[in-house]
Image (tube, helix red, strand yellow):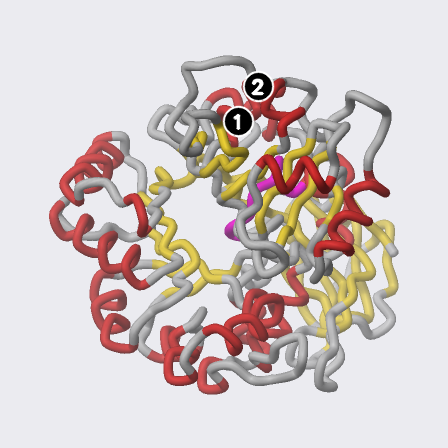
């Protein structure tokens, strides 16, 4: 008597090109091989590759969903282009205009006076390309209320807010109010790219953010955040997130104390380390706190000196990096950095060769949320203009996929994708079907 499955996917192939079939039962992979004998609903893969779903190990869900509802300035390279885009995106009088992706090469770090010239009659907030700054015009500032103002609000020589707000997202959300962005559209977009799991990397995530995120999307959810972030049925509890800014680092003993506090909660730690200074600071704080633990993470690893790779490997730290930034920002890096420093950017191959565990994430909305952009960049290290940065950091297609995929195994959750990733230079993968817990959540 043949076995019964909920679904059999036939006529697929593995990443190695060998024939592959999978039988799914009760949300798990129940059988796998060149063929699967049994009866159930069947799907003919027609030669597509069958693999595990992709997990984006570092992104910001609410900000990414909000970006989908925002004016996008990423491709604006002049003041005229920015102004045209802002005014085209303005809604009814009195409604906020939210813009993202502003490049400071256009007009530096704008203040309220400059923004008043760009859009004088709507409350306007513009986020820079890094996500660290918000810039507000006078109408917007007037809606935030009176003093006292937190330290994130920059003041001019006259003691009044000059329109620049640094790392003030939580305070702005509280003052502006309004409904949070819908996550359902983002969930479907991610599913169409084969993303079956996500890790929200917000440093300020607590109970309120967990309530907004849990269950709002089909993807499996891990949440990083504060020491007060609760466990829950709709998400897995991730590391305590340390947001380190090189220009405003706390005493290293204070960071070590937070690491020690995370240990008492049974949680790992993960630190924002874009610059070399932030990375060195984090390594020192870990040493003071008694050393790294398995599962502790370096987020970004934007600049890793070759001399530190051995220390990272010896500590057993995981590096969660963004290969997509080589593509998205590589031409900027080439224009602004010394050539001999480029090899230190968003390392991959050199870390893997020394035994460092490396995972991939998009850092969306500050990077492209499509994981296939990062997968391509991991293998070719090419910028938008086709230049190569750190060619020795390129990895194989299999190693790139391992940044995001869990290998298929009988008994594992049936988080699966059917996809095609052509081997010609510059190709992005396309996904025909995405399953989470054996349920089809997206189909081409």
Q: Position of residue 40 (x, y in %)?
A: 84, 50
Tell me which residue sits at (22%, 61%) in the image.
315
The span shown in magenta is: 57-64
Tell me which residue sits at (55%, 63%) in the image.
407
For numbered disc 1, what is the local secondary structure? helix
Q: Position of residue 83 (x, y in %)?
A: 76, 47
What residue is shown with label 2? Answer: 144
394 in relation to 86, above or below: below
One can see residue 56 in this view: no
For numbered disc 2, what is the local secondary structure? loop
Q: Left of 99 or right of it: where is 58?
A: left
Q: Left of 358 or right of it: where is 367?
A: right
In the rendered structure, find residue 170 and report the number of the disc placed on it. none
The N terminus - image quarter: bottom right
428 in relation to 282, above or below: below
In the rendered structure, find residue 210 and report the number of the disc placed on it. 1
Q: CA distance from mark 2 to mark 1?
A: 25 Å
Instruction: Answer with the quarter of the image where residue 227 lies.
Output: top left
One can see residue 309 in this view: yes
Residue in front for this viewpoint, 215 or 100: 100
Magenta residue check for 107: no
Q: Left of 90 or right of it: where is 205?
A: left
User: Disc 2, disc 1: CB below 8 Å?
Assistant: no
Tell me which residue sits at (42%, 24%) in the image.
230
Residue in front for this viewpoint, 227 or 27: 227
- The number of discs equals 2
Mark earlier in primary sequence (2, 1)? 2
């Amino acid at each position: 008597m043949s076995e019964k499955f909920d679904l059999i996917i036939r006529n697929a192939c593995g990443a190695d090109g060998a024939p592959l079939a999978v039988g799914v039962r009760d949300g798990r992979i129940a059988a796998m091989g060149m063929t699967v004998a049994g009866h159930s609903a069947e799907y003919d893969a027609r030669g597509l590759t069958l693999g595990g779903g992709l997990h984006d190990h570092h992104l910001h869900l609410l900000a990414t969903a909000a970006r989908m509802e925002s004016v996008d300035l990423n491709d604006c390279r002049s003041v005229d282009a920015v102004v045209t885009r802002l005014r085209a995106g303005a809604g009814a009088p009195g409604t906020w205009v939210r813009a993202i992706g502003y490049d400071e090469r256009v007009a530096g770090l704008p203040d309220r006076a400059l923004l008043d010239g760009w859009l004088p009659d709507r409350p306007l907030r513009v986020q820079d390309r890094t996500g660290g700054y918000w810039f507000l015009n006078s109408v917007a500032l007037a809606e935030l209320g009176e003093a006292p103002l937190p330290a994130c609000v920059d003041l001019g020589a006259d003691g009044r807010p000059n329109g620049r707000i640094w790392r003030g997202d939580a305070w702005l959300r509280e003052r502006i109010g309004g409904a949070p962005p819908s996550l359902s559209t983002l969930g479907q977009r991610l599913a169409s790219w084969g993303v079956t799991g996500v890790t929200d990397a917000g440093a300020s995530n607590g109970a309120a953010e967990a309530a907004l995120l849990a269950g709002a999307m089909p993807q499996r959810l891990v949440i990083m955040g504060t020491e007060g972030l609760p466990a829950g049925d709709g998400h897995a509890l991730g590391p305590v997130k340390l947001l380190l800014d090189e220009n405003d680092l706390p005493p290293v003993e204070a960071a070590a104390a937070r690491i020690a506090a995370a240990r008492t909660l049974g949680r790992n730690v993960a630190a924002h380390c874009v610059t070399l200074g932030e990375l060195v600071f984090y390594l020192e704080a870990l040493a003071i706190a008694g050393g790294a633990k398995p599962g502790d993470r370096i987020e970004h690893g934007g600049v890793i000196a070759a001399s530190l790779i051995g220390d990272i490997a010896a500590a057993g730290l995981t590096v969660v990096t963004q290969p997509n930034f080589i593509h998205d920002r590589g031409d900027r890096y080439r224009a602004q950095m010394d050539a001999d420093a480029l090899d230190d950017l968003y390392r991959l191959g050199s870390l893997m060769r020394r035994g460092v565990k490396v995972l991939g994430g998009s850092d969306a909305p500050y990077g492209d949320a499509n994981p296939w952009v990062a997968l391509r960049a991991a293998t070719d290290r090419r910028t938008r203009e086709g230049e190569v940065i750190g060619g020795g950091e390129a990895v194989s297609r299999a190693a790139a996929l391992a940044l995001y995929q869990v290998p298929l195994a009988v008994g594992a959750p049936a988080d699966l994708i059917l996809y095609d990733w052509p081997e010609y230079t510059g190709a992005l993968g396309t996904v025909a079907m995405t399953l989470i817990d054996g349920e089809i959540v997206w189909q081409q």
